[in-house]
Image (cartoon, grey):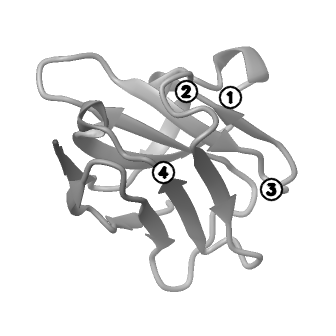
């Protein structure tokens, strides 16, 4: 089982950038998994943010962050990163990293991912 720790959340001003991280627990990696970031506002559905393939060579972004975000994974597959630029109040949410093996058509579906971090809260003030 792979366990992660999400980090990097906090209070952000509109227009600022933020980098979130997801670190695998000691002795584990997520090397063979597709990794993704989702976010959730309480009471609303999960929102797909971005995903990256197991080799790191392919990425997919959700419409809400496309063009102002970047997902990456460390060469040792022990860390996953998400940077969002030009943060907006609508980016306020709890961000979660997930690991799974979805087919491309389901890459933005949260239930296709098996393992999750505990989430990190981001609040963007206007």
Residue 4, position as x, y percentages in the image: 42, 65
Comparing 26 with 89, the one in front is: 89
Please tell me which residue is depicted at 23% across the width and 36% down the height of the picture.
Answer: 89
Which secondary structure lies at badge 1?
A: loop
| Image: 76 above or below 72 | below
Q: Residue furthest bottom?
A: 26
Q: CA distance from mark 1 to mark 4?
A: 24 Å
Disc 2 target residue = 112
For marks 2 and 1, the one nearer the N-term is 1
For marks 1 and 4, the one nearer the N-term is 4
For marks 2 and 3, the one nearer the N-term is 3
Q: Nearer the viewer, mark 1 or mark 3?
A: 3
For the residues bearing labels 1 and 3, Cβ distance under 8 angstroms: no
Q: On residue 20, which mark appears?
A: none
For marks 2 and 4, the one nearer the N-term is 4
For the residues bearing labels 2 and 1, Cβ distance under 8 angstroms: yes
Q: Specify the quadrant of the image occupied by residue 39.
A: top left
| Image: 99 above or below 102 | below
Image check: 83 left or right of 46?
A: right
For marks 3 and 4, the one nearer the N-term is 3
Q: CA distance from mark 2 to mark 1?
A: 6 Å
Please tell me which residue is depicted at 65% across the width and 26% down the height of the picture.
Answer: 107
Disc 3 target residue = 56
Q: CA distance from mark 1 to mark 3?
A: 15 Å
Disc 4 target residue = 84
Q: On residue 102, which mark appears?
A: 1
Residue 1, position as x, y percentages in the image: 50, 60
Q: Nearer the viewer, mark 3 or mark 4?
A: 4
For marks 1 and 3, the one nearer the N-term is 3
Q: Nearer the viewer, mark 2 or mark 4?
A: 4
């Amino acid at each position: 089982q792979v366990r992660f720790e999400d980090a990097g959340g906090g209070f952000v001003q509109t227009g600022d950038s933020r980098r979130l991280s997801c670190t695998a627990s000691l002795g584990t990696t997520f090397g063979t998994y597709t990794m993704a970031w989702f976010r959730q506002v309480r009471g609303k559905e999960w929102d797909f943010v971005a995903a990256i393939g197991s080799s790191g060579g392919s990425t997919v972004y959700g419409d809400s962050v496309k063009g102002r975000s970047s997902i990456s994974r460390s060469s040792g597959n022990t860390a996953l990163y998400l940077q969002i630029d030009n943060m907006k109040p609508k980016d306020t949410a709890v961000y979660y990293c997930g690991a799974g093996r979805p087919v491309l058509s389901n890459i933005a579906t949260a239930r296709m991912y098996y393992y999750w971090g505990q989430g990190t809260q981001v609040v963007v003030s206007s």
